[in-house]
């Protein structure tokens, strides 16, 4: 049986999302941004963020694969689902659950840039810089977390644990 240790509570997550939403709302006032959620992990964060922003936005999703059923990224990023709405000339905010190695986010930002948005920024709820292999520009950061395998609040291990309201370290 896996053991879970809470590292960030649901209350702290909610407070930080409200703070991020206020920053984003200020920066995107009157811009009608497109928020691109990175599936599957970001769906919980994106949902809470959009409601907290409380401004007109459009939402699209992109899905990539790099982990499979492992705790380590394979390093091979595959686009599973591309964008459905045109973003050329629009203000785009990519919303990610976690940035660790940076490979996936770098791949995504390049993919989005090729579609010529007016602006492109990145928002992540969790940042694990100790694992960084490729530097990526993070414009909005929720929490910097230690180098541990985390689950909950949308993050999974083999599709499990997404339902947890807190961010937890998965200890074996």
Image (spheres, rainbow, N blue to C red):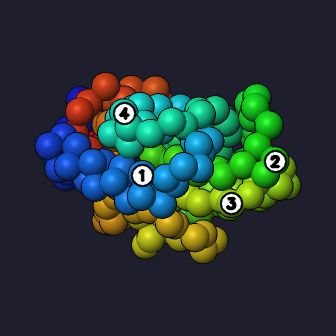
Residue at figure coordinates x 27%, y 48% from the top left = 18
Residue 33 shown left or right of residue 1 in the figure: right
The residue pinned by badge 3 equals 119
Q: Earlier in the sequence, mark 2 or mark 1?
A: 1
Left or right: where 118 falls relative to 38: right
Q: Secondary structure at mark 3?
A: strand
- In space, the residues marked 2 and 1 are separated at their CA atoms by 21 Å
Residue tagged 4:
51
Nearer to us of marks 1 and 4 is 1
Task: Report the front residue among 90 and 76.
Answer: 90
Count neighbours of disc 1 (C-alpha within 10 A) and say few if under 14, some if 14 to 19, many if 20 or more: some
Q: CA distance from mark 3 to mark 4?
A: 22 Å
Q: Residue at x 30, y 48 (%)?
A: 17
Element carrying mark 4: helix
> Is tag 2's residue or tag 3's residue first in the polypeptide sequence?
2
Query: Image quadrant for the N terminus?
Result: top left
**Local secondary structure at mark 2:** loop
């Amino acid at each position: 049986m896996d053991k879970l240790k809470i590292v960030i509570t649901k209350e702290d997550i909610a407070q930080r999302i409200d703070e991020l939403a206020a920053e984003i709302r200020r920066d995107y006032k009157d811009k009608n941004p497109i928020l691109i959620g990175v599936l599957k992990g970001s769906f919980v964060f994106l949902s809470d963020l959009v409601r907290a922003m409380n401004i007109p936005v459009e939402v699209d999703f992109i899905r990539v694969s790099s982990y499979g059923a492992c705790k380590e990224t394979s390093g091979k990023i595959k686009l599973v689902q591309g964008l459905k709405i045109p973003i050329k000339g629009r203000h785009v905010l990519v919303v990610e659950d976690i940035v660790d190695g940076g490979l996936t986010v770098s791949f995504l930002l390049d993919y989005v840039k090729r579609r010529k948005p007016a602006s492109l920024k990145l928002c992540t709820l969790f940042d694990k810089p100790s694992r960084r292999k490729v530097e990526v520009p993070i414009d909005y950061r929720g929490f910097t977390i230690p180098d541990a395998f985390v689950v909950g609040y949308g993050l999974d291990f083999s599709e499990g644990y997404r339902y947890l309201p807190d961010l937890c370290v998965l200890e074996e």
